[in-house]
Image (cartoon, helix red, strand yellow):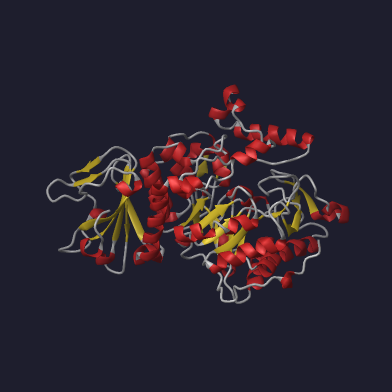
Amino acid sequence: MVVDPASFAWTDGHWPGVSIEGQVLYELHIGTFTPAGTFRAAIERLPALAELGATVLEVMPVADFAGRFGWGYDGVNEFAPSRLYGTPDDFRALVNAAHALGLGVVIDVVYNHLGPDGNYLPKFSSSYFSKKPTEWGEAINFDGERSGPVREFFVTNARYWIEEFHLDGLRLDATQQIFDDSTPHILAEVVDAVRAGAGSRRAIVIGENEPQLARLARPRQDDGYGLDALWNDDFHHSAIVAATGRSEAYYSGYRGTPQELLSAVKYGFLYQGEWYRWQHRGRGTLAFDLAPARFIAFTQNHDQVANSSVGARLHQDTSPGRFRALTMLLLLAPHTPLLFQGQEFAASSPFCFFADHQPELAKLVRGGRAKFLAQFNSVASAEGTARLPDPGAVSTFTRCKLDWSERDRNGHVVALHRDLLKLRREDPVLRAQTPRGVDGAVLNESAFVVRYFGQTSADDRLLLVNLGPRAHLDPVAEPLLAPPCRGRHWAVAFSTESPAYAGWGTPPIDTVDDGWWVPAECAVFLRPDDASSAAR
């Protein structure tokens, strides 16, 4: 197909692009986001996301790949939107429609390897690949002999998506598997290409980096690579242990305690160089200088839902109260929150790993997936292995498609997410995402408080989170619970125990002569009494 990128009639000339501050990301996979699984079909669901309060779509890879279905991380045609989802102009139409609704769009790109099936670049030159292995195949040659044209290929690709599809940025997959010992680093050049492609528009670059190297998100002048934000696995892992109690495999480095969750809210990464037993080495680097918005926090994403072995969603693995409380923590903390498709209406559809390959390769993929998940004791047994979905089965793929009728049936879950995002957007103290703008304290073995500091104490806010039984705090020897100022008291502005969200209701929290009472498995947001609305 020969495509004229100038023939599409864009109507987004007013669109300013996006910066990382103030964003709410929504990750989706085009093939399972709707029953039809196309760019055009996704357009029909955009108004629901805008109404929810999402601001940026983070679309899983769309570069063309072999087979009838897949996640897209085995892409082989970097300059071709997947034929499975529609034409290039269909993708442009999706971006154009999103911009009309005030939604930005970034896509996931895979610059660490290419797929094992359908990759013809070596037919043109053997220099595309290095001798360095990645977890999924041979690494891209960014610093070896004849690497100059290889770098140009991928840098041009980054700019291509921004220029020809008006995208608002990129999410870089598994940057720890991008090897480059040259200067400038290829990641810095990709960031420069995105900025150049955007022109006068703002654009963002987000990175996935399992070792949590803060340098990636530092400015170039501070010896960084200039990325705008990094995914924060630490927040996810601690939240999952807090929600489920399961701390096996890579979760074994987390306890899900109030202190862990507090530290993640205050500092982003939990591991900033400390010993990580699961990997038998130190993990992370100091990140105290990174602003809160530069940490992307989540309780679900494509990898982590799929790694539950059967693709289970968080609400299926924890109690309703804990699910609501952790949702409030995710959406009101000063980091940049990310939701995964269907999370906002408690989708029952799983999200499993699926990939359509020719028989011999499919067999290897199936075995590799079982080997990877065997790190979880609950999966390693014969019974656990028998439950693993076959990645190559059409049924595995189709079961992962969202059932949008559930959005109407689970209106209370939608309302919880929508109302929290509205609160985040409209409350000036939450909206500020001020560096070092919060502090917190552990109240007991399952409860903690986060205090948001405004310009004066009269502008302060409190977030109480209790993941255990009803807590009675008496005495209350904790200064972060102190009244906002003389003559004013705390009043409940939002509670996850509201009947509107299928809760039991919220009795008084701060009593005159009996200390504090925090409902079981609940999160409560408080403001000074004359600045808050009545409790819902």
Q: Position of residue 396 (x, y in %)?
A: 63, 37
Task: Report which quarter residue 309 is drawn in.
Answer: top right
Image position of 279 (left or right of 256): right
Query: Of 88 and 253, which appears nearest the observer?
Result: 88
Image height of 372 relative to 89, above or below? above
Visible residue check, residue 94: yes
Q: Where 46 sits versus 159, above or below?
A: above
Residue at point 78%, 45% (across, down): 117
Q: In the displayed image of the protein, which residue is found farthest to the top?
A: 382
Query: Can residue 290 be seen by looking at this rendering?
Result: no
Task: Return the residue nearer the eye: 513 or 441.
Answer: 513
Quarter holding the N terminus?
bottom right
State left or right for residue 429 relative to residue 51: left
Query: What residue is shown at x 80% (from left), y 50% (from top)?
Result: 119
State the image quarter where residue 493 is shown. bottom left
Where in the figure is residue 407, as x and y percent of width and height? 47, 48
* Residue found farthest to the left: 513
Answer above or below: position of 171 versus 252. Answer: below
Q: Position of residue 235 (x, y in %)?
A: 47, 48
Q: Is residue 337 shown above or below 364?
A: below
Instruction: Indicate the position of residue 5 as horizontal and vertical percent values.
Output: 73, 69
Q: Count how many numbered circles sit on residues in the image.
A: 0
